[in-house]
Amino acid sequence: MRIIGGEYKGRKLFSIPKRKDTKLLRPTTDRVKESVFSILNSYLDGAVFLDLFSGTGNVGIEALSRGVKETVFVESDKRFCELIRRNLKTLAVASDRYKVVCNDYMKALKKLARNGKRFDFIYADPPYEKGYYTRIVNLVKSLNMLDENGLLILEEPKSEPFIPEENRWIVERRNYGTTTVTFLNFSEGG
Protein backbone atom coordinates (compact mmCIF):
# COMPACT_ATOMS: atom_id res chain seq x y z
CA MET A 1 0.00 0.00 0.00
CA ARG A 2 1.24 3.45 -0.89
CA ILE A 3 0.15 7.07 -1.09
CA ILE A 4 -0.57 7.89 -4.72
CA GLY A 5 -0.76 11.69 -4.73
CA GLY A 6 0.12 14.90 -2.96
CA GLU A 7 2.72 15.68 -0.31
CA TYR A 8 3.43 12.04 0.63
CA LYS A 9 3.18 10.62 -2.90
CA GLY A 10 5.02 7.33 -3.31
CA ARG A 11 5.45 6.73 0.43
CA LYS A 12 4.56 3.24 1.60
CA LEU A 13 2.21 2.48 4.46
CA PHE A 14 2.60 -0.27 7.00
CA SER A 15 -0.02 -3.00 7.19
CA ILE A 16 -0.68 -5.93 9.49
CA PRO A 17 0.43 -9.29 8.08
CA LYS A 18 -2.52 -11.54 7.31
CA ARG A 19 -3.20 -14.00 10.11
CA LYS A 20 -6.19 -16.13 10.99
CA ASP A 21 -7.03 -13.93 13.98
CA THR A 22 -6.85 -10.68 12.00
CA LYS A 23 -10.18 -9.38 10.77
CA LEU A 24 -10.64 -9.35 7.03
CA LEU A 25 -8.89 -6.25 5.77
CA ARG A 26 -9.92 -5.07 2.33
CA PRO A 27 -7.82 -1.99 1.59
CA THR A 28 -9.18 0.51 -0.90
CA THR A 29 -7.40 -0.14 -4.18
CA ASP A 30 -5.19 2.46 -5.85
CA ARG A 31 -7.64 2.61 -8.77
CA VAL A 32 -10.59 3.46 -6.52
CA LYS A 33 -8.53 5.87 -4.43
CA GLU A 34 -7.19 7.71 -7.50
CA SER A 35 -10.66 8.01 -9.01
CA VAL A 36 -12.30 9.28 -5.80
CA PHE A 37 -9.55 11.82 -5.12
CA SER A 38 -9.60 13.01 -8.75
CA ILE A 39 -13.28 13.85 -8.26
CA LEU A 40 -12.67 15.57 -4.90
CA ASN A 41 -9.36 17.20 -5.81
CA SER A 42 -10.38 20.85 -6.13
CA TYR A 43 -12.43 20.69 -2.90
CA LEU A 44 -9.82 19.17 -0.56
CA ASP A 45 -7.75 22.20 0.40
CA GLY A 46 -8.70 23.10 3.96
CA ALA A 47 -11.45 20.45 4.18
CA VAL A 48 -12.24 18.28 7.21
CA PHE A 49 -12.31 14.56 6.35
CA LEU A 50 -13.61 11.52 8.24
CA ASP A 51 -12.19 8.09 7.40
CA LEU A 52 -14.80 5.70 8.83
CA PHE A 53 -13.72 2.04 9.20
CA SER A 54 -10.15 3.26 8.65
CA GLY A 55 -8.22 -0.03 8.66
CA THR A 56 -4.64 1.06 7.97
CA GLY A 57 -5.61 4.71 7.46
CA ASN A 58 -4.95 4.41 3.73
CA VAL A 59 -7.79 6.70 2.57
CA GLY A 60 -7.54 9.29 5.36
CA ILE A 61 -3.78 9.60 4.92
CA GLU A 62 -4.29 10.05 1.17
CA ALA A 63 -6.66 12.92 2.03
CA LEU A 64 -4.03 14.49 4.31
CA SER A 65 -1.43 14.10 1.57
CA ARG A 66 -3.70 15.95 -0.85
CA GLY A 67 -4.31 18.97 1.36
CA VAL A 68 -7.19 18.44 3.78
CA LYS A 69 -6.84 20.46 6.97
CA GLU A 70 -7.72 17.56 9.26
CA THR A 71 -8.62 13.88 9.11
CA VAL A 72 -10.44 11.97 11.82
CA PHE A 73 -9.82 8.23 11.67
CA VAL A 74 -12.46 5.93 13.22
CA GLU A 75 -11.49 2.29 13.68
CA SER A 76 -12.69 -0.24 16.26
CA ASP A 77 -9.72 -2.67 16.13
CA LYS A 78 -6.95 -1.53 18.51
CA ARG A 79 -4.25 -3.12 16.35
CA PHE A 80 -5.31 -1.01 13.38
CA CYS A 81 -5.55 2.12 15.53
CA GLU A 82 -1.91 1.63 16.50
CA LEU A 83 -1.02 0.97 12.87
CA ILE A 84 -2.68 4.23 11.79
CA ARG A 85 -0.69 6.11 14.44
CA ARG A 86 2.51 4.38 13.27
CA ASN A 87 1.83 5.32 9.63
CA LEU A 88 1.12 8.95 10.59
CA LYS A 89 4.25 9.14 12.74
CA THR A 90 6.42 7.62 10.00
CA LEU A 91 5.14 10.26 7.56
CA ALA A 92 5.72 12.98 10.21
CA VAL A 93 2.15 14.29 9.89
CA ALA A 94 1.62 17.16 12.35
CA SER A 95 -0.48 15.97 15.30
CA ASP A 96 -2.94 18.87 14.95
CA ARG A 97 -3.96 17.56 11.50
CA TYR A 98 -5.43 14.26 12.68
CA LYS A 99 -7.29 12.43 15.40
CA VAL A 100 -7.49 8.65 15.80
CA VAL A 101 -10.70 7.46 17.47
CA CYS A 102 -10.49 3.82 18.49
CA ASN A 103 -14.13 2.93 19.04
CA ASP A 104 -17.22 1.39 17.46
CA TYR A 105 -18.37 3.58 14.56
CA MET A 106 -21.81 4.30 16.05
CA LYS A 107 -20.41 5.42 19.41
CA ALA A 108 -17.68 7.41 17.67
CA LEU A 109 -20.12 9.25 15.37
CA LYS A 110 -22.46 10.07 18.27
CA LYS A 111 -19.57 11.44 20.36
CA LEU A 112 -18.19 13.49 17.46
CA ALA A 113 -21.68 14.92 16.86
CA ARG A 114 -22.13 15.80 20.56
CA ASN A 115 -18.83 17.69 20.33
CA GLY A 116 -20.14 19.66 17.34
CA LYS A 117 -17.84 18.03 14.78
CA ARG A 118 -18.96 18.28 11.15
CA PHE A 119 -17.21 17.14 8.00
CA ASP A 120 -16.81 18.15 4.39
CA PHE A 121 -16.27 14.50 3.43
CA ILE A 122 -17.03 11.23 5.18
CA TYR A 123 -15.54 8.16 3.52
CA ALA A 124 -17.08 4.90 4.75
CA ASP A 125 -15.70 1.51 3.78
CA PRO A 126 -17.43 -0.89 6.20
CA PRO A 127 -17.35 -4.68 6.05
CA TYR A 128 -19.44 -5.87 3.14
CA GLU A 129 -22.36 -7.05 5.26
CA LYS A 130 -26.04 -6.20 5.05
CA GLY A 131 -27.27 -3.36 7.15
CA TYR A 132 -24.09 -1.32 7.57
CA TYR A 133 -24.82 1.13 4.77
CA THR A 134 -28.35 1.92 5.92
CA ARG A 135 -27.18 2.46 9.52
CA ILE A 136 -24.29 4.70 8.41
CA VAL A 137 -26.48 6.83 6.12
CA ASN A 138 -29.23 7.19 8.72
CA LEU A 139 -26.76 8.06 11.49
CA VAL A 140 -24.77 10.59 9.43
CA LYS A 141 -28.01 12.24 8.27
CA SER A 142 -29.78 12.27 11.66
CA LEU A 143 -26.69 13.56 13.50
CA ASN A 144 -26.18 16.27 10.84
CA MET A 145 -22.52 15.27 10.48
CA LEU A 146 -21.95 16.86 7.05
CA ASP A 147 -21.42 20.51 6.24
CA GLU A 148 -24.00 21.97 3.85
CA ASN A 149 -22.31 20.78 0.66
CA GLY A 150 -20.59 17.83 2.32
CA LEU A 151 -20.49 14.37 0.82
CA LEU A 152 -20.86 10.92 2.32
CA ILE A 153 -18.85 8.54 0.16
CA LEU A 154 -19.65 4.83 0.41
CA GLU A 155 -17.35 2.11 -0.89
CA GLU A 156 -19.51 -0.94 -1.46
CA PRO A 157 -19.70 -4.21 -3.39
CA LYS A 158 -20.91 -3.75 -6.97
CA SER A 159 -22.94 -6.96 -6.60
CA GLU A 160 -25.09 -5.44 -3.81
CA PRO A 161 -25.18 -1.64 -4.17
CA PHE A 162 -26.78 0.39 -1.40
CA ILE A 163 -30.25 1.73 -2.19
CA PRO A 164 -30.85 4.95 -0.21
CA GLU A 165 -34.18 5.98 1.23
CA GLU A 166 -34.27 8.84 -1.28
CA ASN A 167 -32.58 8.63 -4.69
CA ARG A 168 -32.17 12.43 -4.76
CA TRP A 169 -29.40 11.98 -2.16
CA ILE A 170 -27.21 10.25 -4.75
CA VAL A 171 -24.93 12.78 -6.41
CA GLU A 172 -22.96 10.21 -8.36
CA ARG A 173 -22.33 6.47 -8.49
CA ARG A 174 -19.28 4.93 -10.15
CA ASN A 175 -18.16 1.34 -10.68
CA TYR A 176 -14.54 0.16 -10.51
CA GLY A 177 -14.23 -3.57 -11.11
CA THR A 178 -16.14 -5.28 -8.27
CA THR A 179 -16.43 -2.03 -6.28
CA THR A 180 -19.07 0.69 -6.44
CA VAL A 181 -18.48 4.13 -4.97
CA THR A 182 -21.57 6.18 -4.15
CA PHE A 183 -21.49 9.91 -3.37
CA LEU A 184 -24.42 11.21 -1.28
CA ASN A 185 -25.45 14.71 -0.21
CA PHE A 186 -28.33 15.39 2.19
CA SER A 187 -28.85 19.10 1.60
CA GLU A 188 -32.23 20.24 0.28
CA GLY A 189 -30.78 20.64 -3.21
CA GLY A 190 -28.89 17.31 -3.02
Image (tube, rainbow, N blue to C red):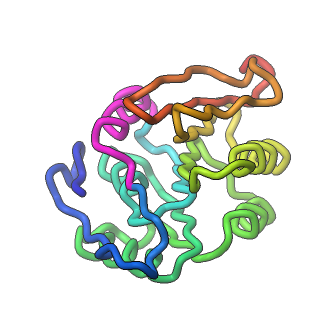
* Residue 141, picture quadrant: top right
* Residue 12, picture quadrant: bottom left
Provide the major secondary structure of the magenta segment. Answer: helix
Q: Residue at x 64, y 52 (%)?
A: 129
Task: Based on the picture, tell me whether residue 31 belongs to the magenta stretch.
Answer: yes
Quarter containing the C terminus: top right
Task: Based on the picture, tell me whether residue 163 belongs to the magenta stretch.
Answer: no
Image coordinates for residue 13, horizontal then vertical, percent: 25, 65
Q: Residue at x 52, y 32 (%)?
A: 158
Q: How many marks?
A: 0
Image coordinates for residue 179, horizontal then vertical, percent: 45, 35
Image coordinates for residue 140, horizontal then vertical, percent: 74, 47
Q: Residue at x 55, y 23 (%)?
A: 173
- Bounds of the magenta segment: 27-43
Would you say 154 lies left or right of 29 here? right
> In the image as oriented, which residue stretches furthest toward the left?
10
Would you say 55 lies left or right of 186 here? left
Q: Nearer the viewer, residue 98 or 139?
A: 139
Image coordinates for residue 70, horizontal then vertical, percent: 47, 56
Q: Residue at x 56, y 20 (%)?
A: 172
Quarter containing the N terminus: bottom left
In this view, 155 is above or below 176: below
In this view, 141 is above or below 83: above
Would you say 12 lies left or right of 87 here? left
Q: Nearer the viewer, residue 133 or 138?
A: 133
